[in-house]
């Protein structure tokens, strides 16, 4: 087998005739003496016969035997001995950018027991077939993959699968079926595309991590659930030989992959994308590890509910994880979220104060008077983050703590208390009951590494179909309504009084000008009246003083007159008596008449009565005397004064 370079065909045609050229070309074609291979193709040489006979073992003829030859032909004309060689022209292997190609060796050493993929620790160059077979290359799927680019690979020995095509030579029906199944497996695992682990983003597939399961290598040791981490010398499982050389084992790996692109042989290792573990603010994560070495108990001699171990050991870790995001392999353990802020547990149907009370219901009580109300209540609880591992070690998780311990304890407490009170007392003493419960349950919660904050008791309500409690409640409501009505009426009366006062004030404001003027008038009149009173009082005092002086004068004057009159009278009496004594008989009458007439004359003089009488007096029947005449005269004078007055 050799290669030749020929000159232009027209030069040859000048020397040799056309018929001869046609015969030579036909002979060369039939005999296979000359073959042309395009520059973008390769030629696989098959030796049809050889003096060394056929290949005794294996697929390729490494020592000149008849069969497929290990060397490939590249572009150009190639000359061969006639009727001895056949050339199979095939495409070069092309792996698209960002894709992976898988290599299957059709010849080589058999795989060892328990080996899944052919090792490439000694031979990893698929371009040199002779070196591959003589260096101990193994048949079957290879651990090494092809990255993007064009690869010159002998398709007689290697079958290469890319996402677009399968590069192979002379596959019979059996081989074709085998490789068809392998392609289905690769397509199922999305094996032609590298593993891309995305970070946080808007995509629903973001913020993930990849859990790796290795399909090749030694099996796990006894009691191991995950293969231990062997470091990063294998570049995140992208170099299988380095991984196995470092002691890596098959099975699900403890080490995970975070954000990045990884060209991993999907026949060597498969991946599963899972979310990262997020511990929100207000929680800590207590790690329960399924893997790791046996750790030393750090819980102390007084804690008898289980062991707490250091981080990385198997068991409950002593130190919880603080709020944050963790690339935690959930197959290596679990993280129990424990709230560190106050959370509410509600014993109430169709209501929830946290994620731990979904199965809690109202507490059924039995009161002293045999009522069976249902009591809704809420309890506020806090867990010290340093005691969170103890809570998980003792109860498994917070929900089990609530349902298996707190629910029976709280229910029993309120059942016991309700038996000492009637239903009415239970309602009316709710505040007292709540205060006592806060004190009593605080110590009970401390026994479970919990901090009791507060209990809030709701209104007892009847069970379904029980109307007796509602009747009592209705009576209490009626009483309260009656009390409120009394208070309402009283308030209405006060409001009415205030409204009346308001209206009076409004009217007074409207008449303020008039009211002011009238008040001024009243004040003026009061002042004038007071002045008149004072003047009258002064006048009275003056009159009283004058009257008293006049009275004193008159009294003194009267006394003088009286004394004078008395003296005159006494003198006259004495004179009259003397005259009477002197004039006895007829002479006495004459003296009396003379005296009377004298007095009458004095009276006329004093009264200034005219001499011509204005009134005629006379006696009836012609009988008259001096006395009757005087009386008649006095009556006439009185009538005249009255007429004048």
Image (cartoon, rainbow, N blue to C red):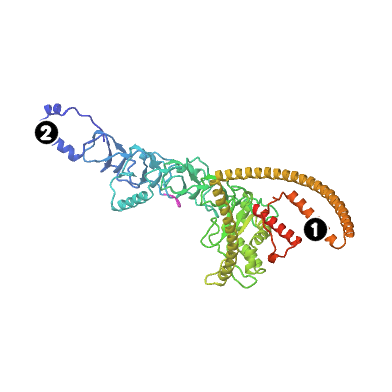
| Crowdedness near tag 1: few (<14), some (14–19) or many (≥20) residues, C-alpha within 10 Å | few
From the viewer's perspective, tell me whether residue 119 is left or right of residue 574.
left
Position of 8 with respect to 469 (left or right) is: left
The x and y percentages for residue 631 are 73, 60
Q: Is residue 479 left or right of residue 20?
A: right
Mark toward the viewer: 1 or 2: 1
As displayed, is residue 551 above or below residue 425?
A: above
Q: Which residue is tagged 2?
A: 20
Give whichever of 64, 336 is nearer the camera: 336
User: Can you tell which mark lies on residue 593?
Assistant: 1
**Magenta stretch holds residue 112:** yes
In the figure, 470 relative to 213: above or below? below
Quadrant hosting residue 91: top left
In the displayed structure, 217 sits above or below 590; it is above
Q: Nearer the viewer, residue 521 or 272?
A: 521
Q: Which residues are magenta?
A: 111-115
Report helix, strand or loop for mark 1: helix
Q: Is residue 291 magenta?
A: no
């Amino acid at each position: 087998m050799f290669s030749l370079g020929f000159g232009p065909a027209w030069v040859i045609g000048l020397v040799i005739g056309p018929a001869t050229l046609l015969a030579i070309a036909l002979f060369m074609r039939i005999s296979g003496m000359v073959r042309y291979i395009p520059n973008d193709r390769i030629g696989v040489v098959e030796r049809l016969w050889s003096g060394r006979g056929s290949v005794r073992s294996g697929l390729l003829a490494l020592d000149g035997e008849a069969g497929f030859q290990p060397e490939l032909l590249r572009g150009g004309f190639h000359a061969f001995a006639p009727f001895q060689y056949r050339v199979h022209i095939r495409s070069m292997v092309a792996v698209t950018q960002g894709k992976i190609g898988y290599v299957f060796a059709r010849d080589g050493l058999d795989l060892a027991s328990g080996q899944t993929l052919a090792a490439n620790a000694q031979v990893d160059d698929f371009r040199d077939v002779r070196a591959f077979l003589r260096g101990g290359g193994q048949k079957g799927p290879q651990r090494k993959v092809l990255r993007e680019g064009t690869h010159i690979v002998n398709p007689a020995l290697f079958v290469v699968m890319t996402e677009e095509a399968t590069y192979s030579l002379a596959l019979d029906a059996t081989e074709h079926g085998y490789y068809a199944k392998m392609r289905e497996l690769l397509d199922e695992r999305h094996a032609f595309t590298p593993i891309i682990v995305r970070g946080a983003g808007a995509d629903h597939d973001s913020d993930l991590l990849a859990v790796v399961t290795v399909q090749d290598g030694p099996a796990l040791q006894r009691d191991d659930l995950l293969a231990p981490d062997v470091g990063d010398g294998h570049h995140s499982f992208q170099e299988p030989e380095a991984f196995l050389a470092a002691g890596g084992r098959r099975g699900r790996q403890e080490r995970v992959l975070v954000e990045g692109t990884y060209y991993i042989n999907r026949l060597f290792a498969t991946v599963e994308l899972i979310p990262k573990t997020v511990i929100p603010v207000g929680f800590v994560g207590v790690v329960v590890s399924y893997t790791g070495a046996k750790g030393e108990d750090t819980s102390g001699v007084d804690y008898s509910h289980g062991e707490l171990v250091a981080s990385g050991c198997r068991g409950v870790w002593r130190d919880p994880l603080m709020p944050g995001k963790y690339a935690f392999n959930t197959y290596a353990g679990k993280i129990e979220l424990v709230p560190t802020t106050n959370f509410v547990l509600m014993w109430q149907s169709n209501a929830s104060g946290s994620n731990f009370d979904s199965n809690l219901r109202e507490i059924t009580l039995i009161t002293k008077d045999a009522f069976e109300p249902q009591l809704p209540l809420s309890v506020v609880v806090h867990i010290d983050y340093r005691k969170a591992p103890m809570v998980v070690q003792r109860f498994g998780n917070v929900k089990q703590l609530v349902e298996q311990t707190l629910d029976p304890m709280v229910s029993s407490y309120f059942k016991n208390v309700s038996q000492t009170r009637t239903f009415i007392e239970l309602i009316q003493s709710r505040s007292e009951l709540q205060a006592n419960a806060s004190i009593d349950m605080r110590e009970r919660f401390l026994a479970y590494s919990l901090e009791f904050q507060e209990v809030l008791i709701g209104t007892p309500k009847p069970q379904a179909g029980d109307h007796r409690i509602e009747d009592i409640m209705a009576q209490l409501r009626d009483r309260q309504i009656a009390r409120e009505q009394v208070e309402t009426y009283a308030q209405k009366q006060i409001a009415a009084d205030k409204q009346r006062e308001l209206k009076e004030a409004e009217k007074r404001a409207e008449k303020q000008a008039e009211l002011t003027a009238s008040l001024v008038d009243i004040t003026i009149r009061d002042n004038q009246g007071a002045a008149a009173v004072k003047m009258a009082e002064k006048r009275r005092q003056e009159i009283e003083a004058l009257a008293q002086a006049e009275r004193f004068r008159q009294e003194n004057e009267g006394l003088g007159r009286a004394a004078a009159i008395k003296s005159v009278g006494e003198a006259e009496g004495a004179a009259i008596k003397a005259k009477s004594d002197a004039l006895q008989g007829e002479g006495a009458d004459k003296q009396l008449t003379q005296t009377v007439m004298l007095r009458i004359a004095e009276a006329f003089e004093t009264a200034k009565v005219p001499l011509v009488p204005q009134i005629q007096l006379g006696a009836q029947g012609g009988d008259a005397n001096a006395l009757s005449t005087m009386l008649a005269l006095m009556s006439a004078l009185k009538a005249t004064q009255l007429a004048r007055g």
